[in-house]
């Protein structure tokens, strides 16, 4: 009996056990949509779902770094639009006279967005302004920059090499999906296997305790916004590649989706908690919701209602499951 209790305790106290609730939701939703449409679990549709979540999946990774660190970043969607617009201009018409090949354009665009992230990081880490206010203001200001840089027009006529970032298949899978997988893998390594990742969690869990223990709390917090800016740029570039144009209103509303994906994936909005696999599963469920409703011919207006309701239900269920698992772990 003691051995059984010990095994049960190890299972329910595992950091991965809380994700079983989200996994059950994904399985349940898949079964419902498959029953209704018959095409949901086909290889082709699974590929479509993965391709659909590329942009806000990477944006969810971008948001997760500040969130786990105990802060917030609402500007990710505007930074993504800036990255896509700058990259499109650099390879097409030139950005204020500078025209480059695609690899250089990607690098320059990521650097520009990292600088924007650094500005956010400076204001959050080294002032007393609330991160929500800082990044809300940044969201609006950066979106204005996108319109200024793009001269209020979309960047079209992009070369095929740019479009290949999204559409070119590698081993039968679109390049953008491989890029997303790489981002998630690198995020898992950084947060789960490095001292830097442990510092990110420690600061988010208890800022004062992390400071007393000798962690450079301001420096780490500052760096999470640089990472967020860089990842947002990658998401914006892939979004541009997918639709073959960079529009000033690109990625609008994606911050909300990223927040929902992180929350459903177990990332605590108060900081100090969250797993990469959870962020991926949360992003996957968001993509499945949209794709499934399309297959069931639910109108676009009702999709907003259903999507919003499912977000609340999914987060509530995740919180309830965590509470249930905690009680189960402490049950004598």
Image: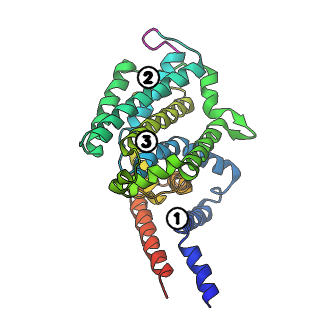
- Callouts 2 and 1 close, C-beta under 8 Å: no
**Residue at label 3?**
224
Look at the image and say whether residue 95 sits in the magenta stretch: yes
Instruction: Give the residue number, with chain letter if any, for mark 1.
Output: 22
**On the picture, is 311 further left or further right than 39?**
left
Disc 1 is placed on an element classified as: helix
Residue 97: where, in percent of width, then height? Answer: 45, 8
Q: Which residues are magenta?
A: 92-97
Taking depth in this image into account, of 112 and 254 the one nearest to the observer is 112
Q: Mark 3 packing: few (<14 Cα in 10 Å), some, or many (20+)?
A: many
Mark linked to residue 154: 2
From the image, state whether disc 2 or disc 3 is nearer to you.
3
Find the distance from the CA under tag 2 to the CA under tag 1: 38 Å
**Magenta span includes 62:** no
Under circle 3, the secondary element is helix
Residue 173 % position (x, y): 70, 41
Q: Is residue 79 above or below residue 5?
A: above
- Label located before the other in sequence (2 or 1): 1
Mark nearer the N terminus (1 vs 3): 1
The x and y percentages for residue 268 are 41, 58
Quarter of the rendering containing residue 176: top right
């Amino acid at each position: 009996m003691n051995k059984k209790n010990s095994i049960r305790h190890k299972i329910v106290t595992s950091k991965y056990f809380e994700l079983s609730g989200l996994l059950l939701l994904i399985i349940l939703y898949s079964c419902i949509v498959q029953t209704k449409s018959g095409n949901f679990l086909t290889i082709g549709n699974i590929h479509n779902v993965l391709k659909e979540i590329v942009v806000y999946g990477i944006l969810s990774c971008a948001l997760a770094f500040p969130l786990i660190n105990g802060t917030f970043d609402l500007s990710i969607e505007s930074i993504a639009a800036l990255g896509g617009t700058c990259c499109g201009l650099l390879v097409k018409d030139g950005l204020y006279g500078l025209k480059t090949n695609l690899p250089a354009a990607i690098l320059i665009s990521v650097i520009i967005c990292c600088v924007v992230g650094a500005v956010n990081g400076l204001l959050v880490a080294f002032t007393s302004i609330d991160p929500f206010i800082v990044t809300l203001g940044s969201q609006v200001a950066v979106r204005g920059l996108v319109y200024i840089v793009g001269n209020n027009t979309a960047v079209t006529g992009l070369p095929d090499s740019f479009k290949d970032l999204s559409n070119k298949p590698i081993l039968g899978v679109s390049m953008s999906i491989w890029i997303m997988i790489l981002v998630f893998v690198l995020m898992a390594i950084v947060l789960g296997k490095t001292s830097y990742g442990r510092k990110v969690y420690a600061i988010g869990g208890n800022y004062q305790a992390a400071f007393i223990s000798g962690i450079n709390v301001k420096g780490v917090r500052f760096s999470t916004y640089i990472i967020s800016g860089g990842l947002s740029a990658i998401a914006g570039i892939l979004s541009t590649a997918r639709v073959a144009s960079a529009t000033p209103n690109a990625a609008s509303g994606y911050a909300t989706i990223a927040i929902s994906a992180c929350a459903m994936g177990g990332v605590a909005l108060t900081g100090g908690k969250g797993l990469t696999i959870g962020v991926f599963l949360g992003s996957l469920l968001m993509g499945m919701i949209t794709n499934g409703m399309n297959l069931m011919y639910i109108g676009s207006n009702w999709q907003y209602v259903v999507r919003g309701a499912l977000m609340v239900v999914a987060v509530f269920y995740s919180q309830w499951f965590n509470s249930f698992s905690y009680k189960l772990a402490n049950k004598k």
